[in-house]
Structures are given as structure tokens and as C-alpha cells.
Amino acid sequence: MRSASSSWAPTTSCRSRSARGRSRPGSRPCSAAGGRTDRRATMRPMLAGLALAARPRRVATVTEIRVCFVDTFALRRATGGGGLEVLVLRRADGGRCPGSWEIVHGTIESGETPVAASLRELREETGYVPERLYNLSRTEAFYQHQSDVLALIPVFAAFVPSSAEPRLSQEHDRAEWLPAAEAAKRVSWPRERRALEDVLSMVGGGDAGLLEDVLRVS
């Protein structure tokens, strides 16, 4: 039997419940002081997760891939029944890469197809209208670090009249017709050197052979 001095005293939570009367059937018994579960504490991690999920996410920047330029090899048969000759152009002062050698190259304008751009650039940079234009079924690529664009460059080959000399624009100050092997050494851009291998392989005989019906544009 407990003494009066050691009699058990109900906790605050139990006293409050006792004051309200007997517990309802099925209700939870009260816990000891300090042991009551704090529902708000258990909800905090879940609420924090929901807040994190609702936070706007930063979209990662993706490098754009765009068809920007065209490369066009101007070709002719060497006089006296020789092999294929390639026109190379030297960049003039005042523009990009002055003194470098290249083939016909230019930007595709808005609303223009690569074929139309190839014909226009050939006419603007050399004055030539091709007798035959070929799609080499080859695309080069160049990464433009300043604009973060991966530029794709379709490649064409244009057979021009053997007797006509090129009429240069302000972009170039010199032009030379060279045998393919010498042209490969002269051009400054490695991509043009690589593409020249396809030129010789596909149209080096003067046409595209068995692929003529697919590769010939005009």
C-alpha cells in the first residue's frame, strides 16, 4: 500500500484528459510526459520534400546544332586532257583569316536551301554558273565556340566551263586552278582536305557514275 507522500500523481496530459471525463472507446491511452508524438515534427521532412520538388528547376543549356554553311568545290578538266583541277581562293585583307586558302564557302541565308546557297555563293565568289552540280552526300561540322553552335556544312561539287576564268569578289584577292593533289596541300582548312577525297572518289571521272541519278542536283 502506497503512502500518502509517495502517492502517484497524474501527468498534466492525463489530468487534462481526466478532467474531461472518461476516454472514448477506441481512443489512445495517454503517454507519459515528454513521450507524446509530435505530428508536426513527423510532417516536416515530407513538407520539406514537397517544397524542394515545387522549387523551379534550372533548365540545362544545350548546344544548338544548325545547318549554317555550304562548301562547294569548283572543278574543271585540265587543258590537254589532263586530270581534274580544283579552284582555290585566297582570303583578302580586311576579312576573316586573311591570306588563308579555301574553296567556295558561305553562309546559308534565311529561307534558303543548301543547294540554293551553294549556287549563289559560287556565283558571288567566282562568277561561275555550273554546268553540273553534285551533292557529295557529305556533311562537315564546325563548332562555333562564341555562339555555342555546332554548325553543319553540306558539301557540293560544281563542274564549271573550262575556258572561263573566275571573277572574284572582295572576299578574295587571288585564285588558282590546281591539280587535286596540290589543292589538298594548299587549302588551310583540314575539313576541305578530307572532303576532297570524296570529290575524287565520287565525281573524279567527270560524273557520279552509277550514283549519277541520286547525286546530280542540276
Image: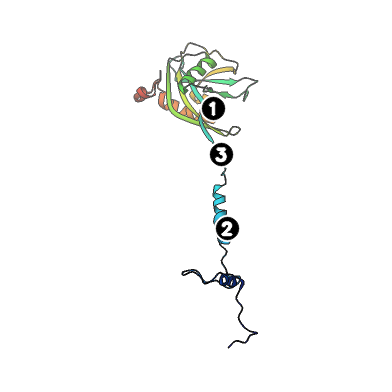
Which residue type carries mark 2?
Arg
The crowding category of the residue bearing disc 3, from other C-alpha atoms within 10 Å (few below 14, some 14 to 19, many at least 20), is few
Q: Earlier in the sequence, mark 1 or mark 2?
A: 2
Which residue type carries mark 3?
Thr
- Give the quarter of the figure containing the N terminus: bottom right
Q: Is residue 74 visible?
A: no
Q: Earlier in the sequence, mark 1 or mark 3?
A: 3
Residue with the mark numbered 1: 185
Q: Nearer the viewer, residue 6 or 49?
A: 6
Q: Mark 1 and mark 2: span between their CA atoms?
A: 71 Å
Q: Secondary structure at mark 1?
A: helix
Q: Mark 2 and mark 3: span between their CA atoms?
A: 34 Å
Q: Secondary structure at mark 3?
A: loop
- Checking the image for residue 203, the label placed there is none
Left or right of 213 on screen, residue 77 = right
- Checking the image for residue 61, the label placed there is 3
Q: Secondary structure at mark 2?
A: helix
Residue 71 at what x, y percent from top left?
A: 50, 24
Residue 136 at what x, y percent from top left?
A: 43, 26
Residue with the mark numbered 2: 44
Please identify the residue farthest to the top as the structure is shown.
163
Q: Mark 2 against mark 3, which lies toward the viewer? A: 2
Residue beneath the point at 44% across and 25% down? 199
Which residue type carries mark 1?
Lys
In the displayed structure, 40 sits above or below 115; it is below
- Give the quarter of the figure containing the C terminus: top left
In the displayed structure, 61 sits above or below 172; it is below
The crowding category of the residue bearing disc 2, from other C-alpha atoms within 10 Å (few below 14, some 14 to 19, many at least 20), is few
Residue beneath the point at 48% across and 28% down? 195
